[in-house]
Amino acid sequence: MAAWGAHGLTVERGGRAALANVTLTVAPGEIVAVVGGDGAGKTTLLRTLAGAIAPTAGEVATPALERIGFMPTAAGVWRDLSVDENIAFVAAAHGIAGATLEERRAALLAGAGLEHATERLARNLSGGMRQKLAFSLAMLHRPDLLILDEPSTGVDPVSRVDLWRMVSLAASQGAAVVMATTYLDEAERAHRVTVLDAGEVLLEGAPADVLAGIPGHVVAADAPGDPARTWRRGRGYRIWSPEEPPEGEPRVADIEDAVVAAAIAKGA
Amino acid sequence: MKAMILKEFRELRRDKRTMAMLIVLPIVLLTIFGYAANFTVDTIPTRVIGPGAEQAAANAPELFDIGEVDAEATTDDALAWMTDNATEVVIDTTTQPPTAYVDGASLFTAQSASAAFGRMGDQVEVDILFNPDLETSWVMVPALIGLILTFIGTIITSIGLVKERQSGTLEQLAVMPLKPADVIIGKIAPYFLLASFDMLVVTFLGVWIFDVPFNGSPWLFAIGAGIFLFVVLGIGVLISTVSQTQAQAIQLAIMLLLPQILLSGFIFPLDAMPTAIAAIGRCLPLTYFVEIAQGIFLRGAGLDALWVPYAVLTGMALLVFTAAVLRFRRDLAPSAHHRAKSKAA
């Protein structure tokens, strides 16, 4: 099965490299989480994959446009249309009609918990419901490549669970899923993670590989150490050290610490 | 408070359109109103015909700019010229006393001409054509149709398109399997239809309520309105391509709408404006639509008389609409490019 993605992707915007030599691959049935801070290049990467931005250099390998599902950051629903009208419009654009439409519509609405809100205008939906509708629209044509730009940002915890269930289902049905997220617990559930920082790939691989791949190691502490290598985590502190961890000790406890440690290591 | 004032100035400085409205618009309005807001017509294009043409031309008050003196021309020729809008006044000396045919469709010109002939006493009999009672509504209603079309075409269309961009759904459309032409036509067609409906309503109401005569061909008028709609819709699309928010689109649309209202001859006669200001008016599409609408409604003019405004509007429609489509396509173009690459692969 073909893997989709980008190779050596560079995108320059306003004379600045928004992405520099980024490579990302995603196979059918796989979920790749793209994480990174504000301005890291997550949205640029996803929009380039979706064809909304032309790359400056590098190659993009994606299915034909009609086989891509894209959910932009701003939800991508028509706020003055009802839930049903949104679905009808996207279905018409993809040429889906009749029994196929009815079957997919019912499945997606049930999955999104929107079956009782079909007449409601999208602008009157809660943030979580709107995101789930947007996801349903992106999934309606059963795309080969599903690109989701922060689908769960600003969404309540229950809706986040629903969304993640829908994403997992899409992948289990064979879609290759690339999703940007600011929630690192979501990233840990993905098959692979790409960590971006200032347009460059900081870490890449399966969550376990990412944890094992950071230089040095991270220790938990009750008091702060070197300010340049210390950050708060809950009630305590984390301190990154460039030294190898003691025998049998993990380098880092989770993705969140790994991302911060990698960023510190890059600047060190 | 000082910090608040400073913040406001900093924000204003970066909001170029608001700055333009604050600084440029007052200057433009002052200039336009100072020079263009003039109801008094200084010269009136005039032809004189009949056996006494030479003498009548010599005796005509200074207001009348005698362009052609033709002793051989007949009253029928005079009426044909008036219908074709070839001149504003014809002094016909084939009758005794001579008859001055005045174009009532040019309201202020007709008022000035009537007053000037009135001062000549019984020497000339005045016959005001097309709008004998010099009804303001007869002149305004046809022009108003153009204004309504401009309003819908520029403001409403640009708002509708920017809304799509603002809500992020333009991006969604760009990556859906829709051809750019489908998106553009699909977005514009409803506004075209709504504006056409409005045009019909205003035309019927104008004729019904204000007794405005409709002397020309409805089909010719419909074609003119259709071409004009393409121009104003194109302007609306262009505005949307350079606006990120609906407020920006409205600002820009107003900045483009205002000169059209003031300089199209809709309110102030172009003949009464200085040449430079009138030249700006001649660059505006509403000017030509007003010419077409008033010509067809009041004078019953045909294409032979109105081919110039039709040709200019057609040229403008091609230019503006093509530019608008190309600009709009640019927003959707990366996906088209991407699609081409995917297919090639």
Image (cartoon, helix red, strand yellow):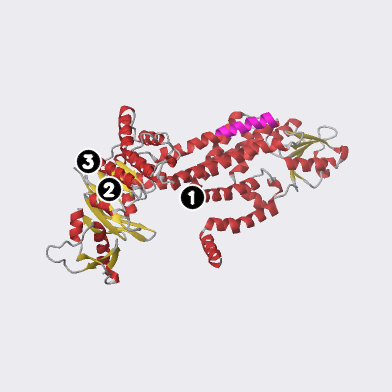
Please name the amino acid that badge 3 sits on: Ser
Residue B197 covered by magenta stretch: yes
Q: Secondary structure at mark 1?
A: loop
Q: Which of the labelled discs sits on residue A172, or is there none?
A: 3
Q: Which residues are magenta?
A: B196-209
Total marks shown come to 3
Tell me if B96 is positioned left or right of A41 in this view.
Answer: right
Query: Between disc 3 and disc 2, whose residue precedes?
Result: 3
Residue highlighted by disc 1: B245
Residue highlighted by disc 2: A178
Q: Position of residue B175 (x, y in %)?
A: 35, 43
Residue A263 covered by magenta stretch: no
Q: Quadrant of residue B44?
A: top right
- Chain letter for the residue marked with disc 3 in the picture: A
Q: Is residue A92 above or below residue B9?
A: above
Q: Is residue A187 visible?
A: yes
Q: Residue at x 84, y 37 (%)?
A: B124
User: Dividing the image into 4 quarters, which one contains the C terminus of chain B?
Assistant: top left
